[in-house]
């Protein structure tokens, strides 16, 4: 069932909402395929390139996104060529298959186009994560043929 996804926004994660975001869970079989939001937040604490936001539908948190944006890490270097990819992305179990993921990804694409003028968006997913592979395929991402040492497949969306 598709819901009205027009009111999807990204919000900063603060001491006021971080527990709600940690409590967002994917489907039981999906949890072995991705990092938990708690682990992602810990990663964001240690990696300067992390840009994370909660995904909200109106006032309800429904998901989590984290980009790796190396311009945050090297922000003092002028004319640095930005490189960014989707590091983590999830929509909570109760909110899946309602169009929230697509809408949130459209906002991410707008963000990377307007902020970076990026000509591609990269993401990674395990080959056994069929939901993610279908989701990204639906949005136009294509496998590049490369994969990470830990087995994740690299997917690319051309933006230009
Ligand atoms: C992958 C994920 C983000 C999809 O989010 P979602 O909100 O359920 O996706 P949507 O409802 O917006 O679906 C968008 C499109 O993808 C398709 N899609 C989504 N999940 C699908 C699945 N399991 N099988 C086939 N198609 C699927 C939908 O049919 C839809 O197509 P349409 O817009 O042309 O109708 C969600 O399943 C999830 O959080 N999974 C666990 C975390 C994860 O694997 N993250 C990605 C890797 S890091």
Image (spheres, rainbow, N blue to C red):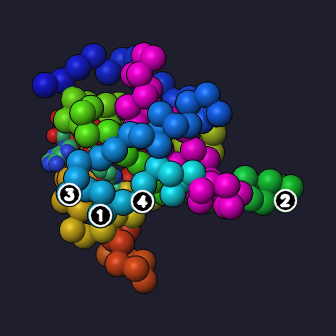
Give how far across and how far down residue 52 sits, in percent: 57, 44
Do tag 4 and tag 2 residues touch (Cβ < 8 Å)? Answer: no
**Residue farthest left in this picture:** 1
Give the camera-side residue of 47 and 38: 38
Do tag 3 and tag 1 residues touch (Cβ < 8 Å)? Answer: yes
Q: Compared with residue 136, is residue 156 higher up or lower down, i.e. above or below?
A: below
10 Å neighbourhood of mark 4: few (<14), some, or many (≥20)? some
User: Mark 1 falls on what kind of element?
Assistant: loop
User: Mark 4 falls on what kind of element?
Assistant: loop
Q: Is mark 1 within 8 Å of ligand 1?
A: no
- Residue 16 sits inside the magenta stretch: no
- Residue 53 sits inside the magenta stretch: yes
State how far apart marks 3 and 4 are (Cα). Answer: 13 Å
* Circle 1 residue: 32
State how far apart marks 4 and 2 are (Cα). Answer: 31 Å
Mark count: 4
| Front: mark 1 or 2 | 1
Instruction: Give the magenta range.
Output: 42-70
Q: Is mark 3 within 8 Å of ligand 1?
A: no
Asked if residue 100 can be seen in this view, the reply is: yes
Asked if residue 105 can be seen in this view, the reply is: no
| Front: mark 4 or 2 | 4
Q: Earlier in the sequence, mark 1 or mark 2?
A: 1
Main SS of residues in magenta: strand
Q: Earlier in the sequence, mark 3 or mark 4?
A: 3
* Circle 2 residue: 77
Give the camera-side residue of 51 and 122: 51
Do tag 2 and tag 3 residues touch (Cβ < 8 Å)? Answer: no
* Circle 4 residue: 35
């Amino acid at each position: 069932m598709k819901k009205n996804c027009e009111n999807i926004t990204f919000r900063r994660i603060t001491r006021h909402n971080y527990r709600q975001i940690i409590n967002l869970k994917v489907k039981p079989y999906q949890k072995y395929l991705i990092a938990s939001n708690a682990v992602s937040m810990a990663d964001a604490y240690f990696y300067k390139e992390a840009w994370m936001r909660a995904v909200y539908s109106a006032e309800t948190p429904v998901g989590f996104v984290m980009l790796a944006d190396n311009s945050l890490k090297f922000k003092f270097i002028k004319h640095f060529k930005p490189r960014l990819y989707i590091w983590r992305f999830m929509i909570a179990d109760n909110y899946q298959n309602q169009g929230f993921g697509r809408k949130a990804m459209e906002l991410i694409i707008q963000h990377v186009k307007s902020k970076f003028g990026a000509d591609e968006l990269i993401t990674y997913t395990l080959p056994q994560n069929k939901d993610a592979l279908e989701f990204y395929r639906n949005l136009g991402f294509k496998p590049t043929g490369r994969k990470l040492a830990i087995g994740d497949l690299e997917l690319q969306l051309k933006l230009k």
